[in-house]
Amino acid sequence: MEIEKVCAILAKNLKKWGVSHVFGIPGKAVVPLIVEIDNMGLNFVLSKHECGAGYEAAGYSLLSGKIGIAIGTSGPGGTNLLTAAGQAKASHLPVVFITGHPSIKDTGKALGQDSTPFGTDLVEMFKPVTKFSARVERGDLVESYVNHALEKAFSGVKGPVHLLIPADVLVEEITPFEIELPDPHHVVSQKLNEVIVLLNKAERPVMFLGKGVHSSKAYEEVKLIAEHWSIPVMTTPGGKGTFISTHPLSLGAFGLGGRDEAHHYIEQGIDLMLVLGTKLSDMSLAGFKESSYPDQVIHFDYDPTFVRKSLKVPTLFISGDLKSNLQMIIINNHIHKKDKASLLSVNQTNTFREKEEENDLFMSSQNAVEMMNYILPKDTIIFGDDGSHSFYAIKHFDIKETGTFFFDDVFGAMGNAIGYSIGAKLAAPDKNIVCLTGDGCMLMHGTEISTAVNSRAAVIFIVLNNSGLDMVRQGMKAHVGKIVGTELEVPVDISQYAHSMGALSFKCRSSNQLKEALIKALMSNVTAVIEVIVNRNEIPPTMKRG
Ligand SMILES: Cc1ncc(C[n+]2csc(CCOP(=O)(O)OP(=O)(O)O)c2C)c(N)n1
């Protein structure tokens, strides 16, 4: 009977699933798997920190629609992956985190980098940040564990899983197996008729779109329904990129980074709010006064955990897959595409803004985002990192195509966008991929620029350098009256830092310099880092939270 090593069988299955890139850092316990991945012709991308590897695997999954794979060795390699698992869970991405253990048969003896309860129990540590976390103690159990892990990763709200496979299990010889990726089952709600009744009755409705619209790629369905019932549309910070800014029904962003149009519309009174794919976090509801609450909410989500929690308003919960539910509404009501000219516009109050005066030392963050808006091709995909820099874009960057802006407002780990953009570029090399980040995020995960350079991922990193952790600095200044631990007395020279890792680098202090750098970076097709020295006294659009 044919037998093969577990690690070779796993590598073959990865290939069968269409995985082209695997991210991680080697260590003795996981070396057999990494070698087989290479033997199989897949690309093993050496990250600079396992957390970066996890972010890269997540970004790869996001743009490829495939499973993401991140590998960290036993002990610290595994603990370094934990934050990325938490981030992948918030991003609803099916990423398999694979860690190791020196030897299962020696468990209980003193082992370096032990990952069992005798050392650093990685299985327990991964449980709260994944949908499934298990140790595979025998070769003949691998198939069953991988099957379960994939089912969890792809069922319901997608998310990460963790498998710890000890080194001696990886080299065990077993009968080969092939696993099919599970088909997602699309559950549809039984209450869709009630939605229609409420929609037909509403006089001043609004749609509020969250990250779930990205996850289910329900962009077209949302647009058809908004147009059919003439419903103005606004987005949460994480929902940025789910609706086109120039659409006549677009109100733009609401909450943190929200636009005046959206906030005015809500303040003038709404009777029905359709909440699509968002938990309604404090960031999404920032500036939403109780006096403006609607009479009724319809909340579409897979997960009921946060339904009726943030808004104490009569709420119809529509459970199940967002896209499938919207499709049922569209089919049952014979909804068709509308002629743009027949749509009533709510999007006419854009306030004219004087450009801020520029000097030779620094520029305005808002001007920087406006220049990005002007220069970047309309299908450029932007990953916004965690900080003031992204909120300038949430407020001021126009979405010209859906699915082109990604930002997480739930877990919000600094530096996640750096890794996400690298993984995304490797998954979709023909797309323009931009990471908008800050100097703080760069100091946390900027070493991944070296990963981008070495794997020829031509990401354009735009770094708004305000020599500090501005989002927290501004919050402390306004709400505490004192700033602590948010300043860099000696600023970091981001362009030199990027240059040292082999990236094409720029330092810009004015709109014209930024324009030139963006054009050069877009034409270069190499990893490029554009440092923009910005005004540290500019007030970011993040002040709506108490
Ligand atoms: C891992 C992690 N630590 C701390 C925070 C809290 N935090 C949110 S934004 C931010 C500042 C980010 O600084 P920078 O990248 O320079 O962006 P800026 O706000 O200055 O634009 C901090 C510290 C976080 N979100 N993630």
Image (cartoon, rainbow, N blue to C red):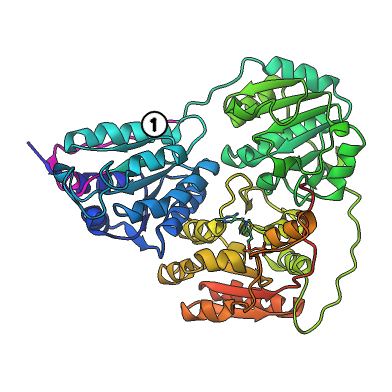
Query: Ligand 1 is in which quadrant of the figure?
Result: bottom right
- Tell me which residue sits at (85%, 19%) in the image: 201
What residue is rendered at 73% in x and 21% in y? 315
Can residue 167 be found in the magenta stretch?
yes
Q: Determine which quarter of the picture holds residue 43.
A: bottom left
Above or below residue 252? Residue 504 is below
Relative to 399, say whether 512 is above or below: below
Quadrant into which the N terminus falls: top left
The answer to whether residue 463 of the structure is visible from this angle is yes
> What secondary structure predominates along the stretch shown in magenta?
loop
**Depicted 320 relative to depicted 255: above or below:** above
Q: Is residue 39 visible?
A: no
Q: x%, y% of residue 93?
A: 49, 43
The kind of residue tagged 1 is: Glu
Residue numbers of the magenta segment: 165-183
On the image, numbered disc 1 is attached to which residue? 151
Q: Is residue 294 left or right of residue 380?
A: right
| Residue shown at the point (69%, 59%) measured from the top left | 471
